[in-house]
Amino acid sequence: MMREAIRQHLINQIPEIKGCFEPHAATAKTQKPYLIIRQGMDTEETPWTGFRRIIEVWPYVSRTTFINVDTLAEKVIRALDGQLLTTQAGEVFTCHYLGTAGDDFVDEDWDAITRGLRFAVMALQPVTVPETVADDPWLDKLALWTANVMGVDWTIYRNFWPLGYKRPAVMWRITNIEVREKGTAMFEVRKRFTGHILGRTPNEQIAGVMTILQEMGNAIKIPLDTMSRKYMTISNMASNMQQDAITAGQISLILARNTNRPAEDAPLIMGVHNSGFIND
């Protein structure tokens, strides 16, 4: 279903191709230019990205010059990279361009020249289904705060990229929890979060990262429970724009708050005695 959606999308977006085929369907007599689609194996990535499937697209042109391959390859990349595609079953997915699948290739038997283009389809299915993900009120409030900051055009996800995730989007996940002693009556809970910001364009993606960082710098704290005036303090913010938005995430930060310990039970005082004198 997914491969058929890619095939039909390429046919619609690149009208000059004579067809888009699986490897066994094309022959030496197939009219050029055309595309070949090959599907690789699924690999388990991470609990938040789900499974990844590799798709290769090979643009075949007449045996003339590789400039013609370059032109067709660029059109394939523009047609697929970062674009939302939908299967006949209504499942939505996105292809990400990974680079070439090797050197340029001369197919002498078919009198053609070609180059492989590799794409990855992420979040084919969640490794952890939503019902098994423990609710975390800190994560919920961080997601709500982000939604208010980013606006209605952005979709906010928690813990993992779901099947059919949309762009632009932000996904937050907890990467570490630490408890620090603050004396006999108090302790500090610190949770590290990673933020994945995924835009429809590189500029939108960078702008999304900058918006979150700036707003967090202004906010200093994020409400946890406004009725009881509980807040989470923001600290240790860091960003790496070069990190992959899907797999690694560009933002790292810590949310922390102090918590009072429950008072320990103590025996009641049965009586008080004194001698009536106070010594200096």
Image (spheres, rainbow, N blue to C red):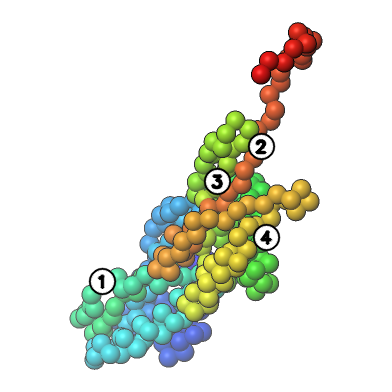
- Residue 257 at what x, y percent from top left? 61, 46
Amino acid type at circle 1 is Gly
* Secondary structure of the residue carrying numbered label 1: loop
- The mark nearer the N terminus, 1 or 4, is 1
In this rendered view, identify the residue nearer to me: 57 or 272. 272
Q: Which mark is residue 260?
A: 2
Amino acid type at circle 3 is Arg
- The mark nearer the N terminus, 3 or 1, is 1
The residue mark sitting in front, 3 or 4, is: 3
Residue 224 appearing in the image:
yes
Q: CA distance from mark 3 to mark 4?
A: 19 Å
* Secondary structure of the residue carrying numbered label 2: strand
Mark 3–mark 1 contact, CB under 8 Å? no
Amino acid type at circle 2 is Asn
- The mark nearer the N terminus, 2 or 3, is 3
- Residue 144 at what x, y percent from top left? 67, 60
Mark 4–mark 2 contact, CB under 8 Å? no
Residue 123 appearing in the image:
no
Residue marked by disc 3: 190
Q: CA distance from mark 1 to mark 2?
A: 60 Å
- The mark nearer the N terminus, 3 or 4, is 4
Q: Hey, which quadrant is residue 215 in on the image? A: bottom right
Q: Residue at x 46, y 81 (%)?
A: 79
Q: Which mark is residue 102?
A: 1
**Total residue callouts:** 4
Residue marked by disc 4: 144
In this rendered view, identify the residue nearer to me: 223 or 195. 223
The residue mark sitting in front, 2 or 3, is: 2
